[in-house]
Amino acid sequence: MKRIALCATVALVLAGCASVPHNDTPSGKPEVTIPKASASAARAYITNRMVDAGFTLRTDSPSQLVFGRLGRQKLVQASWGYTVAYLIVDQKPGVRVVADVHMVMYEGTPLERSYDSSFNQPSDPQGDVYKQVNDVLAGLKSKFSGTRS
């Protein structure tokens, strides 16, 4: 029964990956460049917004922030969650922030697997993660460029 559930979950993940939208950015991922922001100010803003959204900070380095959150699953489903990594490139002046979202199955176990989760289905909980990432980037741009998003 566990094997069937795992196969079904993997099939859904792979089916979702077939509908990968391309972001119109140099990296192909959600990103923003803000000429008037410092790397430290961007890091503080991102950290506050992600913690407010229920993510925990897992890695904190000068050039990268990694957050994680368990997914919303039933007890009979495989354990899964999301990681969101923000690469912060200090361009002096300004900063470029690139986001990368991954779905993680069996987190914290020897079976742990990470899947690129670039797909975004509105009815999928993952859509909430992408909305959060896009809201953080839009808010970052708005806060430091003086525009409204």
Image (cartoon, rainbow, N blue to C red):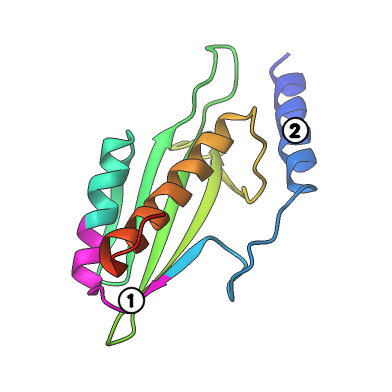
At a point 27% along the width and 66% down the height, the residue shown is 144
Q: Amino acid at mark 2?
A: Leu
**Image quadrant of residue 90?**
bottom left
Horizontal arrangement in the rendering, residue 61 relative to residue 23 (left or right): left
Q: Amino acid at mark 1?
A: Val
Mark 2 secondary-structure assignment: helix
**As displayed, is residue 88 above or below residue 65?**
below
Quadrant containing the N terminus in the rendered view: top right
Residue 58 position in % (x across, y down): 30, 49
Query: The magenta stretch spans which residues?
Result: 33-44
At a point 54% along the width and 48% down the height, the residue shown is 102
At a point 33% along the width and 79% down the height, the residue shown is 35
Q: Which mark is residue 74?
A: none
Given residues 135 and 12, the one toward you in this image is 135
Quadrant containing the C terminus in the rendered view: bottom left
**Image quadrant of residue 54?**
top left
Question: Can you identify the residue that label 2 sits on?
Answer: 12
At a point 74% along the width and 40% down the height, the residue shown is 16
Residue 132 position in % (x across, y down): 44, 42
Mark 2 or 1, closer to the camera: 1
**As displayed, is residue 86 above or below residue 11?**
below
Question: Can you identify the residue that label 1 sits on?
Answer: 95
